[in-house]
Structure formats: structure tokens, C-alpha cells
Amino acid sequence: MPELTEPDVLLTTVGLLSIAATVGLLIWGKVSPVVAMVVVPLVGALVTGASFTDLQEWFDGGLVSVMSVVVMFIFAIIYFGILSDAGLFDPVIRGLILATRGRVVLVTVGTVLIGAIAHLDGAGATTFLLTIPALLPLYNALGMSRYLLLLLLALSASIMNMVPWGGPLARTATTTGIDPAELYRELLPVQGVAMVLLLCLAVLLGLREKKRVAAHAGVAAGSGPVDVKQIAEDFTARQLASREEVRRDIAGGRVVYWANVVLTVALLTVMLGGWLSPALTFLTGVALALPLNFRTAKAQMDRIKVYAPNALMMAAVIIAAAVFLGVLRDSGMLESIALSLLAVIPSGVGSYLHVIVGFLGVPLDIMTSTDAYYFSVLPLVDATAGQFGVATTSTAFALLLGNIIGTFVSPFSPALWLALGLAEANMGKHLKYSFFITWAFSIVLLLIAILMGVVQV
């Protein structure tokens, strides 16, 4: 990469146009992120006079920095797919449904806990498929709002999305080049505080909802007794039916169930303890979980084929991001843009740039997209704030915490549209009900992270 002491007009112009075009294509939604993040920067680099040799070197450098994240993501998705097929989370969710006893406040608290457990795999679509059909009958029976259900599940899943195999942290690790397990170790206390805050918010929203239901006493659904046991039975039956085709191949039983629990706890301990990299941890986990849960080699390979599309989809996006980030960084475009911004940003604001953008994380996600936010906004803010002495980790945490809470209020989230369909809800009403609560929650969480020293100012 060329050393720059002042902005280069050509690099700055092409860099800004490349970022704008990439964001525009992602918002347009007519091409996949892979297309946008590969074609645009390559064309931009050629315009600046880069050679094919340069392009190859920049891609190789970017690929090396993301390969461990790609491997981790692929095998984490496969691992949690195995656990889902094995029904690891079903007894816990069933128990939580029964524990609500049909009481509004307990239902809201239970919703948060169920959402957190269901989202341990980091996949939004799976989370909503598992939770909404199980909880919506309970909400309907009590006369509770389906938009409250969506809000609580969205917030709970967003907080759990901080795990290393979640999309936002994987994107952050790709952009910054920092190991996802290292990022998560610092985020873990913030995640714990966030869950406590959300449980408190669930109680407050539950009390508010209880008053609303009482004010509509004429609604038959909220006035009669609720058969929570039947709702739990329906959930169990639905889960068994969804796994009908693999049940004959699954090695079930209490011994296998608890072996899965022990294996998962052991893997997370090894990864967070830094004894093995996340990639090797989940690769080992898959190698152990497959024969533990599926009887034959054919059944094991068949299940990998089922999990592969989800695993490869995100892996392809991350590899494409290696092209985008590698070209922008190593060509000097990103540095030149940052130097240009230094000329217009007051010095008193520059050291707080990451916090300012973090405060706007939720609306920025709605106006751009998750990929555009992490692969375009984050590196640009990092390059600029870095000139004011702000550490990359601090910038990464500020932008991630400011944005991640709004993951499932953004129209760019495919999983959200699935959730709306399952809940028979409307996007406009969901945004009206959830947006400001979600944004306020993200700002509070970012302020707490600053007080905890995770985000430095």
C-alpha cells in the first residue's frame, strides 16, 4: 500500500464512489452482496491504474485475514444444526412455556429467555421458526400484542447475536482482522448486562401490557383460563413432526442429550479460554457431534448437505468482503478518504467519531444494510478515528453495540420478514411499535459499555 501524507484526489474520489456504489447496490437488493463487493472495488482499482498483479496480492492479503472466520462460521452453523436436530433446546423451551403459567409478566420474561436460548445458534430464521409458532398461541390466548412478542424476541436475539458465530461479530472480525473469540471475551460482560437490562425491560413492558389487556376486558382471549400445558404439548408435537425424516437416524436418549450438553459447554470453555481457535474448536465439535448424534456415515453426510447452504451463504459474503476490504485498504483508497475527512472534521469531534456513529447505529442499519454498515461504514470510521488515536477495538465495539440491537427491526433482515409472516404482523406497525424502544436500548447499552471501559473515549 502506498504511504500517504496527504489525500490523493483520484484515490479519494474512486474510493468514495466505490463505497457509495456498493452501498447503493446492497440497498437496491437486485444483486447479491457477493456481486456488489467483488465487481465494484475491482473496477474501481483498475480505474486508479492497479495491475492484475496488484489485485491478486490485495485479494490474497484479504483472504488470509478472513479465512479463520470463514472456517469458524461454516462449522459453527453445522454444529448448532446438529444440536437443533438432536432437540437440545426443546426441553428448555417447553419448560419455560410451562413456567409462565399464563401470567402476562411471566410470559414477557419467558419470551426473552426462550429467545436467548433459541438464538444460541446465531441464526435468526431458525430462532423465529422455533419460537413464534410456540409463543404466538400463548400471546393470543392472553390477548397480548403480537408486536410485543416480536419486540422481545428481536431484542433477545440481537443480544445473543454477539456470540462469535453470529453474523455481526463475524463481520466485525472480518473488517478489523481481530480474532472473533478475542472480541467476544471483551463483549461477554456487556452481553450479560444487556440480558439483565432486557429482563428488567420485559417486566416493565409486561406490566404495561397487563394494564392494556385489563383495559380491554371485553376481549374474550384475555379473560378466560389459558391452557399452557396444551400449548407446550403442541410445541413438542410440532418439533417432533419437523424432524420426522431424520428421527430414524438420530441416536436419541438421555445419555446422548446430556453428552451434547457437556460437549457444548466444553467447546465454549475451550474457545473462550483461548486454548484453541474458534475455527478448530467448532471443527472438532462437528467431528465429535456427528457420530454422537447420527448412527451411520450416510446419515452424517446427509445432514451436512442440509446445513451446507446456510453455512456457505455467509462464508461467500465474508470472502467477497475480503476482496472489497483488501482493495480499499491496500490500494490506499481508505487511507486517502480518511485523510480527506480529517481536513473537515473538527479535532474536538474526531476522538468521539466512533461513539457518534455508534449512537446512530440502529437508524444507519435501516438506511443502509447490515453488510454495508460493517463492510463500508466500520472500516471508514476506523481509518478516520484511528488518526485521532482511537483504538480499532474501541471503534469496533462502539459501532457493533450501537447497531446490533437493531438487527431485527431493519427491513434489510431476511429473518425479520420470516418473523413477520409467522406472526401475521405488518412491517410498518412493527417499526412503529419497536423502533424507538430498540434505538433507546442500543444507546443505553453503548453508554454502559463506555462506563465499563469496553468502549474508550
Image (tube, rainbow, N blue to C red):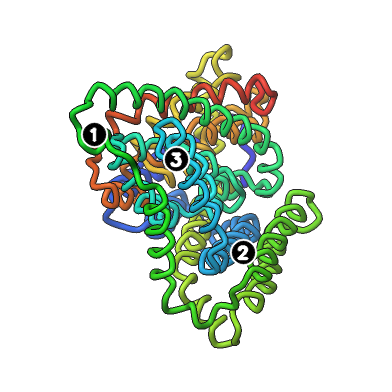
Instruction: Identify the residue at horizontal 35%, vertical 29% (top origin).
Output: 435
Judged from the image, the secondary structure of the residue bearing numbered disc 3 is loop
Q: Nearer the viewer, mark 1 or mark 3?
A: 3
Q: Is residue 78 left or right of residue 108?
A: right
Q: Nearer the viewer, mark 2 or mark 1?
A: 1
Give me the C-alpha separation between circle 2 and circle 1: 39 Å
Q: If you read the primary sequence from the N terminus, does the residue marked by circle 3 or circle 2 appear first?
A: 2
Q: Is residue 279 left or right of residue 356?
A: right
Q: Position of residue 277 (x, y in %)?
A: 73, 57
Judged from the image, the secondary structure of the residue bearing numbered disc 1 is helix
Judged from the image, the secondary structure of the residue bearing numbered disc 2 is helix
Of residue 189 and residue 213, the one placed in the foreground of this image is: 213
Instruction: Identify the residue at horizontal 51%, vertical 20% (top origin).
Output: 343
Residue 43 visible here: no
- The three-letter code of the residue at mark 2 reads Val
Q: Position of residue 406 (x, y in %)?
A: 42, 35
Q: If you read the primary sequence from the N terminus, does the residue marked by circle 1 or circle 3 appear first?
A: 3
Count of picture labels: 3
Give me the C-alpha separation between circle 1 and circle 3: 28 Å
- The three-letter code of the residue at mark 3 reads Arg
Q: Position of residue 451 (x, y in %)?
A: 66, 19
Residues at marks 3 and 2 touching, judged by CB atoms closer than 8 Å: no
Residue that carries the numbered disc 3 in the rendered image: 101
Instruction: Identify the residue at horizontal 68%, vertical 70% (top origin).
Output: 255
Viewport quadrant of the C terminus: top right
The extreme front residue here reads 225
Residue that carries the numbered disc 1 in the rendered image: 429
When the figure is inspected, residue 359 is found, relative to residue 406, above or below; the finding is above
**Residue 71, labelled with which disc?**
2
